[in-house]
């Protein structure tokens, strides 16, 4: 009898605990394999909707909002039921026709539960860079015409960066000629960023806002990558915001400035949003504030 009671007790203890139900009404994820794609080479956008069974939610077709990119194919996967949730996956086959930058806009929709709770869910925008791989020969990307004349204006930011690099090389050569050990000359990331932002500031009111949008965002992304060590240059704006290290995210005012600069640049440059000609001055000032608030000197770190 004791053995039977012991056996029943062991069987009761071995029963697995009931899994906790996922109570989040809706989750939506949109992703691409890489933020860098090759022109005219297809790639996939994957959109996943993960919702509770009692929730009513219909996400608009992301392909309808995509401009410039070529939509080649749309595949809807069979809905999968996991516990109290239903997962639906849509895959959109896209192609960038030419080298350049492209934006996949975010989409969102309202949801409603059986007990009349409501809300919205959706995806953020995804920024892509289409770059021709070295050594490829794509006839569509090589028009049969004479080479275009070079731009009369060389980007001032690039000129400043080249001057700093040239100065470092000149110092190294001078020391080597004197027979000294040549120290490694590193231009601090904040100095490069501030010089580039100052050069962009001189172009406000002269160049179109859309022409400055990408450059302001690029300067800030390069600085964040050099300062904090995460690949901000190769990330979309939502990825950058999620990947910000704790020491940056804790500075709410600075983290919010990062978000405003990147999102404003995305929508002006890639979504064609109309803004005043003076708007880039505000982005440049916000980017400068991020740099000056997060710079670390060697003497400070010691």
Image (tube, rainbow, N blue to C red):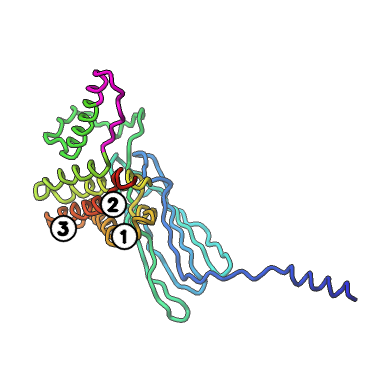
| Percent of width and height locating residue 51 | 48, 67
Residue lying at the far right in this picture: please name it: 1
The residue under label 2 is 294
Residue 125 drawn above or below residue 197: below
Packing grade of label 3 (10 A; few <14, some 14-19, many >=20) is few
Q: Residue 176 lies in magenta, yes or no?
A: yes
The residue under label 3 is 275
Residue 55 in sight = yes
> Could you say which disc has been placed on residue 251 in the image?
1
Residue 63 in sight = no
Q: Are marks 2 and 1 in contact (CB under 8 Å)?
A: yes
Residue 164 drawn above or below residue 242: above
Q: Main secondary structure of the magenta part?
A: loop
Task: Write the residue at 24% across / 56% down.
Answer: 264
Q: Give the left or right position of residue 48, taking residue 95 as reference.
A: right
Q: Earlier in the sequence, mark 3 or mark 1?
A: 1
Q: Residue 249 lies in magenta, yes or no?
A: no
Considering the numbered disc 2 on the image, is that residue within a helix, a strand or a loop?
helix
């Amino acid at each position: 009898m004791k053995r039977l009671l012991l056996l029943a007790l062991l069987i009761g203890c071995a029963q697995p605990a009931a899994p906790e139900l996922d109570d989040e009404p809706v989750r939506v994820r949109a992703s691409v394999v890489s933020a860098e794609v090759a022109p005219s080479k297809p790639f996939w956008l994957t959109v996943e909707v993960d919702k509770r069974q009692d929730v009513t939610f219909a996400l608009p077709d992301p392909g309808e909002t995509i401009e410039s990119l070529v939509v080649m194919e749309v595949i809807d996967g069979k809905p999968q039921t996991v516990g109290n949730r239903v997962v639906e996956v849509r895959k959109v086959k896209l192609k960038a026709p030419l080298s350049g930058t492209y934006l996949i806009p975010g989409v969102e929709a309202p949801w409603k539960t059986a007990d009349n709770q409501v809300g919205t869910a959706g995806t953020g925008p995804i920024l892509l860079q289409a770059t021709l791989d070295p050594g490829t020969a794509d006839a569509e990307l090589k028009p049969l015409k004479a080479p275009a004349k070079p731009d009369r204006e060389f980007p001032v930011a690039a000129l400043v960066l080249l001057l700093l690099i040239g100065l470092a090389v000149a110092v190294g050569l001078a020391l080597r000629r004197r027979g000294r050990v040549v120290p490694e000359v590193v231009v601090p990331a904040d100095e490069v960023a501030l010089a580039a932002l100052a050069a962009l500031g001189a172009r406000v009111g002269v160049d179109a806002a859309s022409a400055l949008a990408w450059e302001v965002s690029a300067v800030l992304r390069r600085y964040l990558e050099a300062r904090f060590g995460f690949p901000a240059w190769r990330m979309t704006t939502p990825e950058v915001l999620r990947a910000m290290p704790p020491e940056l995210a804790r500075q709410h005012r600075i983290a919010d400035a990062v978000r405003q600069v990147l999102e404003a640049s995305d929508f002006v440059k890639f979504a064609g949003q109309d803004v005043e000609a003076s708007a880039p001055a505000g982005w440049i000032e916000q980017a400068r504030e991020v740099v000056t608030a997060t710079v670390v000197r060697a003497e400070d770190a010691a």
